[in-house]
Image (spheres, rainbow, N blue to C red):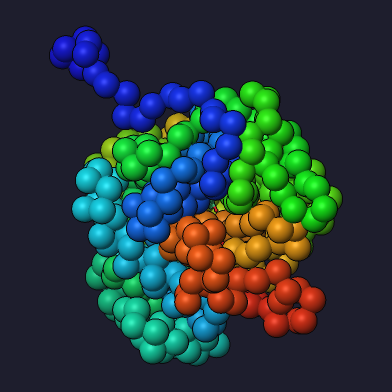
Amino acid sequence: ALTGHKGWKPAWRDPEPKSHYDIVIIGGGGHGLATAHYLSKVFGQQNVAVIEKGWIGGGNVGRNTTIIRSNYLLDGNEPFYEFSLKLWEGLEQDLNYNAMVSQRGIMNLIHSDAQRDAFIRRGNAMRLNGADAELLDESQIRAEYPFLNFNDARFPIKGGLAQRRGGTVRHDAVAWGYARSADSHGVDIIQNCEVTGFRIENGKCLGVETSKGFIGATKVGCAVAGSSGRLMAKANMRLPIESHVLQAFVSEGLKPVLPGVITFGAGHFYVSQSDKGGLVFGGDIDGYNSYAQRGNLPVVEDVCEGGMAIMPMIGRARLLRMWGGIMDMSMDGSPIIDRTHIDGLYFNGGWCYGGFKATPASGYAYAHLLAKDEPHETATAYRFNRFETGHMIDEKGMGNQPN
Ligand code: FAD
């Protein structure tokens, strides 16, 4: 900055851990930091810490493609994601932080009559839950996106389902905004501190072992997204979750060309344009389970083929960079926000490719559970026992749609 960065105050403190907290949250990603914000600001919890093994924002909250939406079908999901979208709409005022929330709209393309029927059903379910949904015909798509490939032999564009209130949010600003707010409400954010184990005695969790020593806690909330399987194994828990890499890509900066977000589900490709001008896009997950935060080349080819199929002009843009993040893929495509069988140990995870848009509602619902020991009304379906009883929220088409 012009001042030479002199006299700037850090946006959050760098405290040493206390010996005991009422609530310790593991994971300084979007969900962990949002939980800390709502715990301290809404639920009046004053003695809370977030423990992050790296730096906050270094995980998926800073790696995703920034898309927010609430276009789900099933009862277990739609009210939760609509609650999240409403929280996004008031987030910048709540945090007093510019997170560049941009409701530029999202469009799911339709390629067949059967797909149109399915999208009409989804749109109706969204509207019944108070969300917005709009069915567009081919001529309306042509007017908004004239450069798309309308005549692809396999996937001709026949219309689209639009959610105008969907859009994008500057992802790392979300981590920073929640962190600054939580810190200002007294939460200790402890970075470079890895949780290496749990201290569990007589079925009760007493705290966490970390690279900075033992930290006691009355309640411990895990929110480590792609590392969920590895972390919960330290409490001898096996989760209905697999970890996969998802890659994202950004082109060189271009003049404004894309008004909103487009998803091409049939070819596994989706794209938006950042405020800096880069085309931000992605596609399918990598083909095998992994904890590596980098992707494989066959998926690069696959995603670029999807882009060329639906938006041939993308072939003129140069790719600037690509990266990968670890996704916590649940078996039905929907998340878990629940107590575990261990007293004082709570779990939040299974966000698949879709956890960024869920950040505010997940934080709110998890804070509600941790503070009151009761699930929030929008998250009552996100329990572990659905995998025992068979009451799946099987929405892989949307929960697992990559964006
Ligand atoms: P993270 O930011 O990963 O936070 C978890 C944190 O836990 C990490 O910082 C990690 O370092 C920490 N941690 C792990 N183990 C430990 C330990 N033992 N001790 C202490 N700390 C630990 N979702 C959308 O809704 N829209 C999108 O457009 C979208 N696009 C995506 C594109 C890509 C390429 C990727 C990778 C993901 C995308 N997602 C999207 C999904 C979304 O990013 C994630 O579901 C969500 O960010 C996960 O929650 P989080 O932010 O809390 O995770």
Residue for point 51% across, 65% down: 372
Q: Residue furthest left?
A: 2
Location of residue 342 by image quarter: bottom right
Decide if residue 27 is in sight here: no
Percent position of residue 159, x then y: 39, 78
Q: In the image shown, does 383 or 101 lie closer to the viewer?
A: 383
Residue for point 40% across, 65% down: 84
- For the N terminus, the quadrant is top left
Location of residue 103 by image quarter: bottom left
Residue for point 79% across, 76% down: 388
Q: As drawn, is 142 to the left or to the right of 192?
A: left
Location of residue 142 by image quarter: bottom left
Percent position of residue 135, x then y: 35, 83
Q: In the image shown, does 247 or 383 lie closer to the viewer?
A: 383
Residue for point 68% across, 38% down: 208
- Seen in the picture, residue 363 relative to 254 is either above or below; the reply is below
